[in-house]
Image (cartoon, coloured by chain):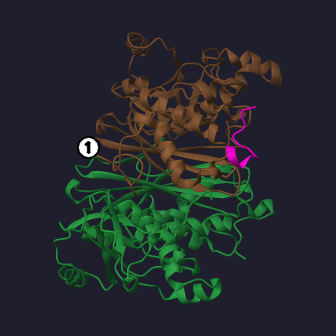
Chain colours: A brown, B green
Amino acid sequence: MPSPFTRRRSQSVSSLGEIRLITEIQRWLGNATPLAPAGIGDDCATLSGSPLHQLITVDPVIYGEHFDDSVPAKGVAAKLFHRNLSDIAAMGGRPRAALVALALSASVKTDWLREFYRSLATIARRHHVPIVGGDIASQPAGFNATMTVIGEAPESAVRTRQGAQPGDWIFVTGSLGGSRLGWHYKFAPRLNEGHWLASRAEVRSLMDVSDGLAKDIRALTPRSCRPCLRRSSIPISRSVQAAAKKSGRDPLEHALTDGEDYELLFTVNGSADPAALRTAWHNHFKLRLTCLGRFEKSSSLARFEDEIDLTAYHGFEHLR
Amino acid sequence: MPSPFTRRRSQSVSSLGEIRLITEIQRWLGNATPLAPAGIGDDCATLSGSPLHQLITVDPVIYGEHFDDSVPAKGVAAKLFHRNLSDIAAMGGRPRAALVALALSASVKTDWLREFYRSLATIARRHHVPIVGGDIASQPAGFNATMTVIGEAPESAVRTRQGAQPGDWIFVTGSLGGSRLGWHYKFAPRLNEGHWLASRAEVRSLMDVSDGLAKDIRALTPRSCRPCLRRSSIPISRSVQAAAKKSGRDPLEHALTDGEDYELLFTVNGSADPAALRTAWHNHFKLRLTCLGRFEKSSSLARFEDEIDLTAYHGFEHLR
């Protein structure tokens, strides 16, 4: 098992101490980190000024919560970096730089940490997102890595969760559900897709699906509206069959509530043609794109025959 | 004791759950957090574009490491916010915005967390640094709050740890040592001082003292130089006497190695007049300013009579 911890002091970060560990991290990151003051090693990281709106997101991976001994360091690094990049994608931005704040017990294995940082470096190079700074602190037990990513976008191209109107179409990229079988360590952040969507005037709001469609759609829903989603429209991921077999639950429930899909959920002006958007999309992307339904006024009580009763589904909620 | 934890579920954050907790946090922060998308509640926080250099720093407070049951939530919040602001001061910048990533066990007391956030809000208002976003995650045990602060400064006024030359004067603000007796929860970040210093052409490098002067001075020391500090020049803090009485160690050792002073350590062009700088300083600030000595070429082996042998002192190192 690739546990991050060891009882042998000689194999642990405590045998290095902080100063040598920082030198090692710089070596592991290689050209994925620029030299100070732009890189690791000063009081702050620095980025040049920019006329674009700056987007800032912060998300952790925590041992015992987001991963355990069964997950290799590479998967942990991928999850940490990609979930932050997914937040930048969910605003329509491009990532500029990342920082990593590490809180770790003295028993963390040096080998494990090396693989973790080398994996971060690979992702940093792939997406041209240098790791410009961070912090290392001791903690009594466990492992907690918190990443901050700075991105940017022209003001006109920033898409938030607000902006949907009654009658707007609801779309989602890719497919949903079953992410716990591995997807949440393997997904690719939808950066190009988010950037493209944010350039389209008919796209009015945008987010990524992290807690499950049933919960996340609420954040986009305009006041006095309900999302009318057609049961037959939900793009159910292939791994849902395996998840449903294991859990004994309905595949649709998995697709709506599993969370960690990291697909993009967005809304489109109700007077735009959904088919035209889909055609334009497929000129750029192979990824599936699905129109799930639209926002109806809550006053229209009649349900469509195929409409999902979302009150029956709950997405992931922390601290419960 | 103001422990952050409770065994009673009704008094803990788990009785709120994530969604209500976020609403409560927004209420506790009040006008210290703007509305989304600029504030909490979207995939990213947004800041407007700026021609200035952007400074980014990230630092945590961790239960069992930076505080324990004896420290009120207010002190924990002050330490978290101020150590990040101190990093911005240490580059000569002005803070723009902060984000807080919380990793907490379900047993965290709601009352404790309310005081923590209200204290953050007070500091945010005092320094005009809105809390624009963050994250909440569960963790198996404990409490870990990681703050990211974004600041800015004109490129010409950014001061890094690099830039000192042989012969440069070494200065420090305030006094040193004994911080563990309370200072590290109470200090004021030297934002105005750092900003003023960075506007002075003769100030060539700048940092804050977090791990103790004996360790931190190494980061400013030019290649082939050694810092020659006069023993009699070290500004020893009043609380050092009490600390030394408790520890039985030399007061000077406390001043050089205790760390968490959060004073500014900086270097001044060797051909500038230290007395002139001090006069200009005291036109703006009441805070003590001390010239500790200067950088000498390592080749000049002769020590001054009053010179401190820094190899005999070690500052704070994590993971040891």
Q: Amino acid at mark 1?
A: Ser
Name the foreground residue: B20 vs A76. Answer: A76
- Subunit of mark 1? A
Q: Is residue A130 magenta?
A: no
What residue does disc 1 label?
A50
Residue at 47% across, 49% down = A134
Q: Quadrant of the N terminus of chain A?
A: top right
Visible residue check, residue A58: no
Q: Is residue A4 magenta?
A: yes
Image quadrant assignment for residue A44 = bottom left
Q: Secondary structure at mark 1?
A: loop
- Magenta-highlighted stretch: main secondary structure? loop
In the picture provided, is A19 more to the left or to the right than B140?
left
Residue at 25% across, 68% down = B168
Magenta residue span: A1-11
Residue at 54% across, 37% down = A117
> Is A88 situated above or below B174?
above
Percent x, y of residue A30: 43, 35
In the picture provided, is B63 more to the left or to the right than B218?
right
Visible residue check, residue B61: yes
In the picture provided, is B90 more to the left or to the right than A84?
left
Percent x, y of residue B50: 26, 49
Image quadrant assignment for residue A153 = top left
Percent x, y of residue B123: 45, 70
